[in-house]
Every structure is written in structure tokens, then in C-alpha cells.
Image (cartoon, helix red, strand yellow):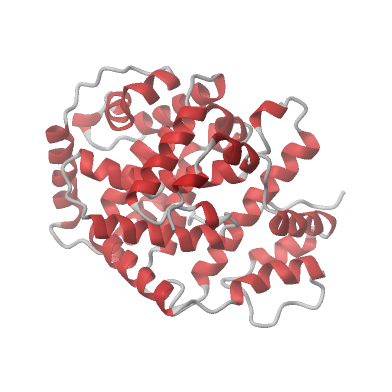
Amino acid sequence: MSKLKLYQNERLDFLRKQEDPLADQAVGELMRQPEIISQINQWTEIPDTLPSNFTPSLQEFFLEYKQELTDQEKEILKQGQSFFNKQGDIYLAMLGFYSLPYCYAFANGAEVLVRSNRIVNESGKRLGETAKFLLEVFRPGAFLNSGEAFFICAKIRLIHAFSRYFIHHYSKDWKEEFGQPINQEDLLGTNLAFSLLVLRGMRKIGISISKRESEQILGYWKILGKLMGIQTDYWPDNNKEAFELEKLIRLRHMRNSKAGEILIRSLLSYYEQNQREAFLKGKSESLVSFMIGKEASSALGIQTESIFTSEIIGAIFQFLGWKNYAGKKSHARFIQEFEEGYFQQFGEKVRIQLPERKRS
């Protein structure tokens, strides 16, 4: 049955008021027992037997990740991982130059992000954590042969709940018009940015993506969305539904905001400071502008006329792929280059951790 009838303003208005009760209850318990946060941060995956000091809310949250995958889900995971194994470098590039900037153009959602000092002041580390998340959930055998990817999704879900907790308890300038922080509509929009828009960006630079491949990626992100607390009843099952849902969210929320401008300037500054290719120095804004288009560029207050074309960008990414991988792309190569580059830049390994708070 088509989900197009779900994509109405009244229904999305409802989703803006919805958060993630299971994760929010778990974070409430963690705030009361902060020593458990340190305990969780020591894990590499969710243990089969949960510690005896976990409250019922924490038990319920983590037990949700012990449910068996269906045969259909297993096949979708295998197909998605095969796709990433071939296109992972471009996927990550689209994340940085298309998906994230595009998200910043959505004014109400940007209000959550701009309240994170790490996103504004440590753009590189925050971008690295997002790349690490993608590399882990698309790792060959992820969810199928080990439990590490389940744990990564659980941590991201809890990090979202921590953000909601801090805004509810400490932000004095949060407005009702923003909706609930990291609400269900914004979660759907972010997942679309990491799936539909990535593929849209690939096509924009001349990479051929079949209808079957794009719907496999949508199916992959439905599984990820469920693991991260998204109400997947609204998640699109095909390209038409994805197109219509993204269009409606864009019409509802894409507009200029101070928050969006702060976020994009921070990101562009990071790109310029760390650009390794001399021929791209000084061109980060133009590259992002080309990828996200005139409407989103205008919403972010950046230049709307790009010096690039599809052919030029396609040639640049083709050259960088040859330079970095010499025609031998694979997930193992992607993660090796990413981890080496991150360590060289920051002098540490990238880790996705829950925020720890010490008792006073």
C-alpha cells in the first residue's frame, strides 16, 4: 500500500511533536546513574547478559537490539554493503559536500545542531564521527556476523536522546515553533539526506544509479532508522515515495536562519583549512553550492552561482578515486584511509562515545 497518503502537513506536524520515548527514558536513567555511561562506553558491542545494575528502562532499551533479523532484511543488508564496497568514497564525499550542508538549510532542525559546541567549534571531529558511523554500519558483514553495528546505532540513538535532554533541561531560548528537539520529522529528513540525497548527488556528477540500487539503499536506511528509533511506518518504500516525502519536508522547512549560516560557515572553514588538493583550495563554497543547488545555497547565505559543472565535478572525483585507490576500491581501503587521515590530523582514533558526566 502506498505511503503517499501519509505525506501531509497535518501528519508531519504531529511527527514534529514526537521524540523517542524508549531512548529518552534510558537517558533519564543514565543521568541519574552517570557511572553507567562510563560502563557502556567501555563496550565494543551489547553483551548477551546485561549488567545487574541496569534499570528496567535500560534493560528494555538494549534488549530491543537483540531481535532477530528477517531473511529479507539480511538480503537488503548484503546488497547495501556490496554497493558501499564499490562506491563508499563517493558516498562519504556526498555526505560532506551535499547531505550535511543540505540539512543545515532546514531552519528548525538547524536550531538543535547549532546548540552543539562540538559541531560549531570541532567540525572536523564531528564530521569524522559521522563518517565513522557510516563506515561501521556499511562494513561487510555488519549486523550479520557481529554485533558492533547494532551497538553503534544504539549509541547514536542515545546521543540524540542526550541532546534532547540537555535542550529540555538547560536551553532557555528553545522555542515551541522549532518543534521537539530531534523529533521524528527531523529524523526522517536526516535519514533521507543520508540515503536519497547521497544517490541524487551521485547522479548529479554523472554516476549511474539504477532504480533497484536506490531502493536497496532506501531499504538499508529503513533498517538503520528502526535501530535509531525512527517511526518507520512513514519511511518510503520506493523512489516515488522518497521523492515526495523529501519535497514536502523541504517545502515546510527550507529557509534562511542564523543557525544554518553559523553551521555552514563553520563547515566551509574546516574544509578550507584542511583542503589537501591545491586545485580545490578556495573553492569549497562553490563546490557545496553546486551540490546543494541554488535554493539551499540561498537559504544558507552562500553563493548561488557555482564555477563547477557536473562534468567537472565528476572528473574531479574520478581523479581523486584513481589517486587514492588506483582502481582498487573496497571498504577496507576506505576505512584505512579514513582512520589514517583522522589520526594524522587529530592525533587520536575516532570514537563515538556517550557524553560522560561526573557526579559533583
Q: Quadrant of the N terminus?
A: bottom left
Q: What residue is shown at x 78% (from left), y 27% (from top)?
A: 172
Residue 323 horizontal side relative to residue 335, left or right: left
Q: What residue is shown at x 22% (from left), y 43% (from top)?
A: 203
Q: Image height check: is 120 above or below 80?
A: above
Q: Which sits in the foreground, 60 or 356? A: 60
Q: What residue is shown at x 72% (from left), y 55% (from top)?
A: 21
Can you see residue 353?
no
Q: What residue is shown at x 64% (from left), y 78% (from top)?
A: 47
Residue 169, position as x, y percentages in the image:
80, 39
| The quadrant where residue 352 appears | bottom right
Residue 201 horizontal side relative to residue 49, left or right: left
Residue 120, position as x, y percentages in the image:
54, 32
Residue 69, position as x, y percentages in the image:
49, 76
Can you see residue 211?
yes
| The quadrant where residue 305 appears | top left
Q: Image height check: is 7 above or below 48?
A: above
